[in-house]
Amino acid sequence: MVGLQGDVTLTGLNLLRSPAEVPWREISATIYRNGLQALPITALIGFLIGIVLSYLAGQQLHDFGADSFIVNLMGIATLRELGPLLAAILNAGRSGSSMTAQIGVMRVTGELEAMAVMGISPTQRLVLPRMIGQVVAMPLVVLWTDCLAVLGGMLGAKLQLGVAPAEFIHQLPQVVPAVDLWFGVIKGALFGGLVALVSCFFGLRIRPDTEGLAQGTTQSVVTSLTLVLMLDAVLAIVFSSLGQ
Amino acid sequence: MSEAPQVVQAVQVADSPPRLAIEVDGVWTRVGGAVIHRDLRLQVRLGEVLAIIGDSGSGKTTLLREMLGLIAPSEGQIRLLGVDMQHLNAEQRKKMGTHCGVVFQNGALFSALSVFDNVALPVREARFWPEELLEDVVLVTLEKAGINPADANKLPAELSGGMIKRVALARAIVMEPELMFLDEPTTGLAPDQAHAIIKQVALLKQDYDLTVVMVTHDVDALVGLADRVAVLAEQQLVTVGTLCEVANFPHPFVQSFFLDKKRRCEKQRVAEFRSELRLPQPAVSTEE
């Protein structure tokens, strides 16, 4: 995987010298498929998790008479952690598996060999555009998920604690530093790139038969999720003082 | 087995020194602990059609892939048009790709691209023809491969097996290559479609003055196309020669391959004859 990342970096640097060869169509297709088409499901999950978290947290805060802290809790938890993580988990399951299966099927049907004969680099045509597309799309998906999760949290806070939506929205920018929002967005880009790299890596090395395709896709999703959570933990520790 | 190298040598030194399209020189292929190829030596002359036959698992397709540089042999060298395929960088490989057309066993068309885009892809990648000429070039090539230009916007999933092979043929010749590689071009096709593909390849070979290397099990393809036949068995190249020479070569695989096909052809002829005379067909033997 490190080798593939190196190959992607070198290919990217080469493309900077010849922008005409940048695979714009593939990048745009990735943004459309993994970004735009993922919006309904991330919206639904974000909204529902927002409601659940707000409801449960609201009960505890109410017991301690700390109702007003629901905005702090929901804001920081969502923008810094939940939004990027939910988006990444959904992205790994939905788009990651799709990317692995797509490249895997190309291997099964001999399309990768046909590309090799024509001298088309799979890194340039398959891996790099997916990584760039994911790095562009994921921050936007994270922002979208954040919005819907906050909306769900606002609804939960209204139902559980009676906090008015206007008050919630008014307080949010005051108690949640903007750096938390941007930290979450940058995490989204990193998670997106990581999911694309892992998915393409497993897709390219799939055993070319149906069982290999199933195994490779499962391994890809499990590895993506594990690495995303590990990266999240590392970032949480390294940047723990950020925004404090 | 002792006469095999003599036969190979006899064919190689038969005429005046030919111009060579492909040279396979002392190739060994090992996968894990298993030896697939043992010291293969083979020369393909410019303009000829060489068919490679052999039992299942004898490494025919592996040899084809080695010729294309898709996998490297464990030992030995393969040269295409004098170029050593194992030591090419990405740019050289891309350039070499313009000299080689390949029809893979299942066509290997890009499922996300239309027929037109599949055929146009190698041209676009190599910037072989100017973009304004591309449409004309692709449509003419489709016609030459026997495809109705009205089908150019179809996706591979909408095509029949014969059509897929024809599109793969069109993609293989669109760059006007010197070499064409066919991996089981008639496998999985109905007899009439297989016959049409053989005819199409023969026409294209003539039009483009191609050197063709073909892996096949199909005797019709051998009869219809091959100038010479190479037989892979027991990890070695047991003989190379004209169809007649090879068919009479005393090797168990060769004998069983041609005898079996001959019997089937005879039975088919008998069946057709009886059918014409409206005689009852003979009962099927349980030995088969």
Image: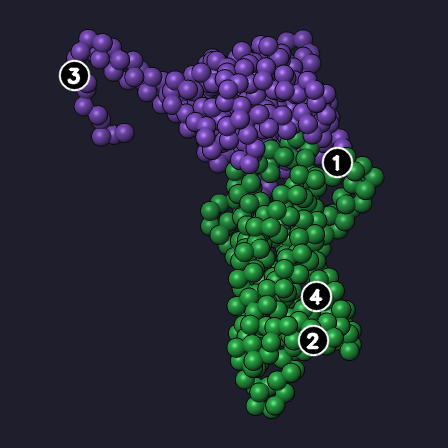
Q: Chain A is drawn in which colour?
A: green
Which residue is labeled 2 in the image?
A: A171
Q: Is residue A135 above or below residue B229?
A: below
Name the amino acid, label 3.
Answer: Pro
Task: Work out which residue is located at the far right of the displayed protein and give it.
Answer: A17
- The residues tagged by marks 2 and 1 sit, at their Cα atoms, a distance apart of 48 Å
Q: Where's residue B254, x and y in %?
A: 44, 23
Which chain is tinted purple? B
Q: In this view, does B238 lie above or below B200?
A: below
Q: Where's residue B207, x and y in %?
A: 59, 10
**Are dots 4 and 3 on a single chain?**
no
Residue B63 can be seen, yes or no: no
Q: Which of marks 1 and 3 is in front?
A: 1
Residue B118 appears in which quarter of the rendering? top right
Label 2, secondary structure: give it: helix
Name the amino acid, label 2.
Answer: Gln
- What mark, if any, has residue A184 been given in the picture? 4
Q: Does the CB distance between marks 2 and 4 fall below 8 Å?
A: no
Judged left or right of residue B177, residue B151 is left
Q: Which of marks 2 and 4 is in front?
A: 2
